[in-house]
Amino acid sequence: MKFNVKALALTSGILWGVGVFLMTWWIIIFEGASGDATFIAYIYRGYCLSAVGSIIGLVWGFVDGLIAGAIFGWLYNLLACEKKTA
């Protein structure tokens, strides 16, 4: 079985981007918005715990997930060994 690399990349990008977005709003709702630098802010340029930061995190997360999903799918397809039946 081989993965559809484009579909996996798109799905990974959407899930990761929405995950970062929802995580940001979860923290904002329960702890309040702050401009404090978080671990993610060191990775994603422009990200902070704010409404604008959640949009920036969504975009960076989508790009990051898209690339990671494409690499994973490509490597999986490269390394997957299918047994051919006679």
Image (cartoon, rainbow, N blue to C red):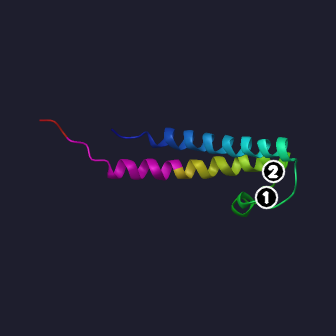
Identify the amino acid type marked 2. Gly
Magenta residues, start to end: 69-83
Residue extending farthest to the bottom is: 42
Identify the amino acid type marked 1. Gly
Residue at image position (76%, 59%) is: 38
Position in image of residue 83 (x %, y %): 21, 42
Residue extending farthest to the top is: 86
Q: Residue tagged by mark 1?
A: 46
Q: Residue tagged by mark 2?
A: 53
Work out which quarter of the rendered image holds the N terminus and state it. Answer: top left
Q: Earlier in the sequence, mark 2 or mark 1?
A: 1
Position in image of residue 86 (x %, y %): 11, 35
Choose between 3 and 48: the one closer to the eye. Answer: 48
Residue extending farthest to the front is: 30
Residue extending farthest to the left is: 86
Q: Quadrant of residue 47?
A: bottom right
Q: Residues within 10 Å of mark 1 (few under 14, many from 20)?
A: some
Residue at image position (88%, 54%) is: 34
Secondary structure predominantly adopted by residues drawn in magenta: helix
Q: Residues within 10 Å of mark 2 (few under 14, many from 20)?
A: many
Residue at image position (79%, 58%) is: 46
Residue 83 placement, left or right of 3: left
Residue at image position (70%, 46%) is: 20
Residue 77 placement, left or right of 25: left
Name the element at disc 2: helix
Check if mark 2's residue and mark 1's residue have beta carbons within 8 Å.
yes
Q: How many marks?
A: 2
